[in-house]
Each structure stands twice: as structure tokens, then as C-alpha cells.
Image (spheres, rainbow, N blue to C red):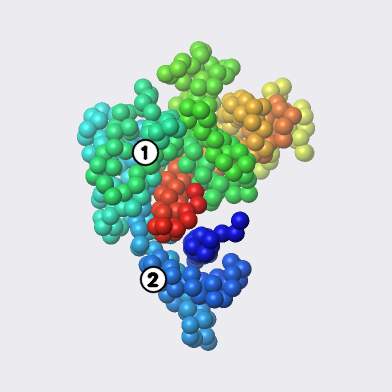
Amino acid sequence: MPASPSTARAINDRLALRLLQQEGPLTAGQLKQLTGLSRPTVADLVERLTVSGLLTVVGEAGEQRRGPNAKLYGIVADRAHLAALDVRTEGVSVVVSDLVGRVLAEASLPIGGETGTGPAVEQAVALVERVAKEAGADRLHTVGIGAPGLIDPSTGELRDSSGLPEWHRRLVAALQERLPEARVSVENETNLAALAEQRDGAAQDRDTFVLLWLGHGTGAAVVLEGTLRRGASGGTGEIGFLPVPGTTALPSATDCDGGFHSLAGSAAIVELAREHGLTAEGPAHEPVAAGVVRAAVGLVSGVGGVAEAAVSGVGGVPEAAVSGDVGRTVVPPGQSSESLSAARFLDALADRLAVGVASVVAILDPGCLVLGGEVGQAGGDGLAARVAERVRRMSPLPTEVRASALGGSAVLRGALLTARDGAQDELFAPPGRWSAR
């Protein structure tokens, strides 16, 4: 059954707006070429979207061309303002952008564990209002929030968790109350990080992959055939609770100590580094573990051949140079004790991470796993290669392991992308016309 004229117009409008969002300002001729629509149809949609306040002329194409055909059309960026929040146990970060995603203002605020629920909520909401004011936003159209914990799939709300501050759950309601015209939504932080890595980061060429979040804590996001999988209770990817060897106890329903978190959380990585004689400091906004890993990678990569030896034990490195443990390196004579300790620390960390990664691979066979978060980014290609080699020896399923391209900023980026998509879905589908979801 052919689409009605109104439905066809709505489809064409959304197609043109999506292209303008992705490509930037375009002429009517360029829109005709990219959409495959006829010249009259493009002329009609340009006029319709201009009258509706979604398009405007932003310049002309080429120095020698003048006239109607040279006009460059762009989305009216200030038609809506968006906010994104990255809510962490120890604070909150906020960014405000226009409709096309251009960042206008941003700020972060630490919130100590001793801060009461009411004051913490007030500080976070006040930060959003201040950043919006700095961005020149009279009102916010959509607010996207990334937070740790489970999102109830039936309500879309952050579920209660004994391991997280109460102000996290109260914040969503408080923002909705203070910003009654805004659409406020919350999503698990790791899921948002995966969305960002797929759009702009390490997984741009993958429809199926798993993101292993390595920050203060651990988590995972599962994307299968282009769809983010949340599970029956919203708990897909709670890998911190995965029982693993090498811990002193089993995790409980309310505490992931004893699970994979006990091996790969920031505190565990820092302790592992101390056991190898390594310490480091980093920016206050990132986990200490990221600084330790970054320093170790720097020590190892600064010496030719060490990284390669640590990964494979082959390819020019004699098997005798590798101990009985998987891929564990004995650095050749003349190597400094500091870089030797760094290499062994990275080997031990890769051993730990491979336990969790191999479990994910055995169940999901994603073909690609991204080491995300601040720690995954700090480890870079060297740590990713170490983990990949161990997984190759542990599993018959081929799995590419990649380092995060966005690190900890992926949560905020994912929240902003989600907010922008939501706003555009509404604004690009005028009332009374067909809307795709």
C-alpha cells in the first residue's frame, strides 16, 4: 500500500533533516543528489521546513555562484537546547548543547560522600541551571542522564541500589520538577558509553560488540545486530557480579565484592600495581587506576620490543623468554627494573581482564570487545593486545579487542547523543504527521 501524500512528505522531511544534521549545511541541489528526490519535491520540503522554523539560509556555496541555487540551508541550531549529565558516585558533569550537538557550556562538580541527599540533589540541579544560563539557553528541551545502576525497563527509572548514593535516584525527579517543560530521561552509564563508542569511537564499524567498562567500577554493555540489549530486569552487563577465580569470596545480591569487580575495579588495579612496585597519580576527575595504567604503558612502550614480547612470546621473541603463564614476559637483560615491573603489572592485569572477557565471549560471541572507560583508554592498544592474546588462547571464538577511543567522556557523549536523538525525533516530525520511532 503506497504512502499517503502527508506520510510521504513527513518521510522526506525527516530524511532531509537527518542529512543536514550529519553533513552540515547543503544546497537544494546537494539535497536532491543525496536524497534521490526530484527537484520540485526538494523545493517543497525546503520551503516547508523553513516556514516551520527548522531550516534557515546560512550562506552560499562557492565564490562564483549566486542566486537561489547557491543558497546553503542548515538546521536552526538554537531551535532547542539540550543538556547531558554524567552522574558518578563522587560528582556530576554537565554539558549543554544546541540542536545539532554543538557544545555551548560545560562544568563539573564534586559531591562528597558526606553530603546529604537533599544538599547533593540541590547542588546537582543548580549546576544544570547554571550551565544552561552560561549557554544562553532560556529553556532546556531535553535532558539526558547517564548514571550507574540498573534502569527499570518498565518505568525507565533508576532502580534502588544499596551500593549507590540516594541522591542519584532523587535527581531525576528534582530535575523534572525544576524543569517542567524539559523531557528528562536516564540511562545506564555503560550503555551510553557503548552508544558513543559506536557512533564516534572504537566501534564505529561494528553492529555487534561488547563494551567492558573499566573505571571506578566495572560494567558491560551488549550491542547485538545494532540493538542495545538491556535484559528482562535491565541488568544485562552487570559483570561486576560475575563469580570469578582469584577472589576470596563470592559476590552477593547486594555487593559485588568477590565478583569480577574485585579483580578489575579501580581499587583492585591500584593494589595490583602496588604489588608490582608501581604508583601514580592522575587528574582528580578520573580513577587512580587510569593513572597507574597510563604510567605503566608509558614505561613499557618507551623501550623497544617490550610491548611485543609481553603480548605474544612469538614473532621474534623466543618461547624461552616467556614463562609458563599465558603471554607472561621475561624482559631481556639490560631492561630497567622499573619497566620490567610495569610489563609484569600489565601482564597480570591482562590476566585478570581476560577472565571476564572470556566469559562474555563464551556466551555472546560478539566478535569485538572494547575496553572502555578511563582505564581502558589509558591501557591503549598495548593492554588491548595483551587481553586479546589471552582470550585467543582461552577461547576458540575469534574476538578482536580494542581500546576505547573516548574513555570516561563516552558517558557524557552518549547522554548528549541520546538527548539530541530524542529532541530531533520530536522536532523533525511535525504534529499530525507520521513519526518514526
| Residue extending furthest toward the front | 1
Amino acid type, mark 1: Val
Q: Helix or strand or loop: what does disc 2 sit on?
A: helix
Q: Are marks 2 and 1 in contact (CB under 8 Å)?
A: no
- Location of residue 435 in the rendering, given as x and y in whole percent from the top left corner: 47, 54
Tell which of 183 and 211 is nearer to you.
183
Q: Which residue is mark 2?
A: 51
| Above or below, comparing residue 396 to residue 143 in the picture | above
Q: Position of residue 105 (x, y in %)?
A: 33, 55
Q: Which mark is residue 434?
A: none
Residue where numbered disc 1 is placed: 87
From the viewer's side, name the closer residue of 325 and 373: 373
**Residue 328 appears anywhere in the view:** no
Question: Residue 157 placed where, x, y %?
Answer: 38, 34
Quadrant of the rendered structure where residue 80 is? bottom left
Sequence-first disc among 2 and 1: 2
Which residue is found at the position 47% from the left and 42% from the top? 192
Quarter of the image where the N terminus is located: bottom right
Left or right of 108 on screen, residue 57: right
Q: Is residue 258 left or right of residue 116?
A: right
Q: Considering the numbered disc 1 on the image, is that residue within a helix, a strand or a loop?
A: strand
Q: Nearer the viewer, mark 2 or mark 1?
A: 2
In this view, 6 is above or below 59: above
Determine crowd level at label 1: few under 14, some 14-19, many 20+ residues with C-alpha closer than 10 A.
Answer: many
The residue positioned 77% from the left and 29% from the top of the image is 319
